[in-house]
Image (tube, helix red, strand yellow):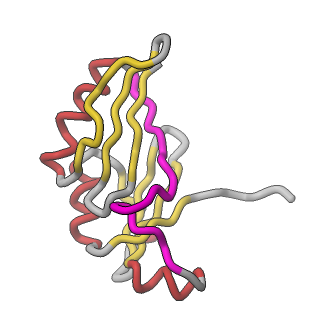
Amino acid sequence: MKPKKIWANYAVSDLERTSQFYTQLGFTPNGPHTSKELVSFFFGDANFVIHFFLKDIIEPNIKGQMSDGHAANEIVFTISAESREDVDNWAKEVEPAGGKVVSPPEAFGKGYYGFVFTDPDGHKFNVFHM
């Protein structure tokens, strides 16, 4: 089996808030896949796609509940930063955009530097430089 493409789907409670958050952080909207049920963005040089569906739309389609990002970890995506300064700049931009810094930028391990943030729905991301 060879997948043609892979992307992620998250559940959110407010499409406008989600769109504003990711737009403010500089992600590119995936326009053709935006509707009254979802917003979609490209992440990284390879244009990885994350769709953000309204929770009441996605749950019936997957025949189950989505995790509450504030209460449990679904997955943590890592965003690669070009430098420690980029990590610090990301950390400064998250909260004004509506997210929350979970752990401030810090060095850990040998040559690793990063921080964790959540979007307004609690979805976790790690911004990381090594």
Give the vertical position of 35 relative to 90 (above or below).
below
Q: Quadrant of the N terminus?
A: bottom right
Residue 87 pos. (x, y %): 31, 27
- Image quadrant assignment for residue 46: top right
- Image quadrant assignment for residue 98: bottom left
Residue 54 pos. (x, y %): 38, 78
Residue 78 as seen in the image, left or right of residue 36: right
Is residue 45 visible in the rendered image? The answer is yes
79 drawn magenta: yes
Q: Main secondary structure of the magenta part?
A: loop
- Image quadrant assignment for residue 116: top left
Q: Residue furthest front?
A: 71
Residue at 31 percent across and 63 percent down: it is: 121
Residue 88 pos. (x, y %): 25, 26
Q: Residue furthest top?
A: 110
Q: 26 or 125: which is nearer to us?
A: 125
Give the vertical position of 98 relative to 110 (above or below).
below
Residue at 23 percent across and 48 percent down: it is: 100
Q: 96 or 106: which is nearer to us?
A: 106
Give the vertical position of 113 relative to 72 (above or below).
above
Residue 24 as seen in the image, left or right of residue 43: left
Magenta stretch in the rendered image: 65-82
Residue at 73 percent across and 58 percent down: it is: 4
